[in-house]
Amino acid sequence: MKLLIQLCSVVVLILCSQNIKAETVITVSQSNSAKQPVSLQYKQSPRLVQVIKDSLENSAPLANQHKSLAIYWLAAGLYDYSTEAEFQQKQQQIIHLLKTQYDDMETPQNIKALKSLSAWFTANKFMKRELIQLDYDSIRLEDELNPLLTGRYLLTLPSKPEHVLVLGAVEQNGSQPFIVRQSATEYLNNAIPLNDSESSYAWLIQPDGKLEHYPIAYWNQHHIDIAPGAIIYLDFQGVRDNEQQLNQQILELLRHWIR
């Protein structure tokens, strides 16, 4: 397997790739704002473990340049570039739906929540995330965790964050400091839930994309550990007929957020 490794910006990467008939191209970034990702190009489809190994070996200059911390494997993500247009469309649909929710609404708190959530979606990027194990020590030992990769992918290798993201039917959409063993109820209380919100359960999206229903009422309390970088989403409920559909579309898109 012939591996060509280049350090170049996203724009230069496209130019560098024009004359190379690569079967698989992996762009490796240690954050979604990194300006100089590493490009790994393979003439034959590599196994996932090979991609991870090459990424670790060849992202050292990037790590030194940005003084990155250790990789937080729970939040590492592999995203399929071929789905970029599809997910941009889904993103725009949600932004449009959020706007129509508050067009004729007279509740200031609800309008604030919907506008801030819309602003968050506008500012972020999404592509299909392959919900697979990426930790090198795990995948190299089990063949079923080590698929062949063909196409163009973005591999993100972030450092461990110090926050939890709270979104949805709350007055203050955004990040909160991570606190060990703090419950979803406490994070939500800090964000101030709307009167028109789900009161029994919230949704927890762990950094690896795992989706869990988190009980938040006094009668169903059950602790679930929340990892740094997780998302807590509270459903809108009680105002519009299309809220259930909107909540589901938002949840699905959040699992494919490029961190």
Image: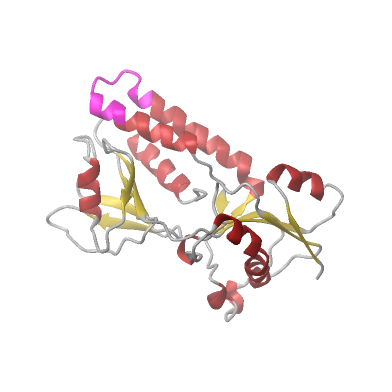
Q: Is residue 31 magenta?
A: no
Q: Nearer the viewer, residue 156 or 232?
A: 156
Query: What is the x, y in percent for residue 74?
Result: 46, 64
Question: Can residue 198 be seen?
Answer: no
Q: In this rendered view, identify the residue nearer to me: 159 or 213.
A: 159
Q: Position of residue 18 (x, y in %)?
A: 83, 47
Drawn side of residue 74 relative to residue 47, left or right: left
Residue that sits furthest to the left in the current view: 219
* Residue 156 drawn at (x, y percent): 57, 57
On the rendered structure, is 44 left or right of 187? Answer: right
Please tell me which residue lies in front, 151 or 29.
29
Q: Which residues are magenta?
A: 100-112
Q: Residue at x 72, y 50 (%)?
A: 8
Whether residue 121 appears in this view of the structure is yes
* Foreground of the two, 194 or 124: 124
* Residue at x 87% of width, y 49% of height: 19
Q: How many marks?
A: 0
Give the residue at the far right of this rendering.
19
Indicate the quadrant containing the N terminus: top left, top right, bottom left or bottom right.
bottom right
Q: Is residue 211 left or right of residue 68?
A: left
> Which x, y percent locates residue 203?
32, 51
Residue 11, picture quadrant: top right
Q: Is residue 197 above or below residue 207?
A: above
Query: Coloured how?
Result: secondary structure
- Above-or-below relation of 47 to 76: below
208 vs 190: above or below: below
Considering the whole magenta stretch, tell me its main secondary structure.
helix
Which residue sits at x=59%, y=61%? 64
Q: Specify the quadrant of the image occupied by residue 132.
A: bottom right
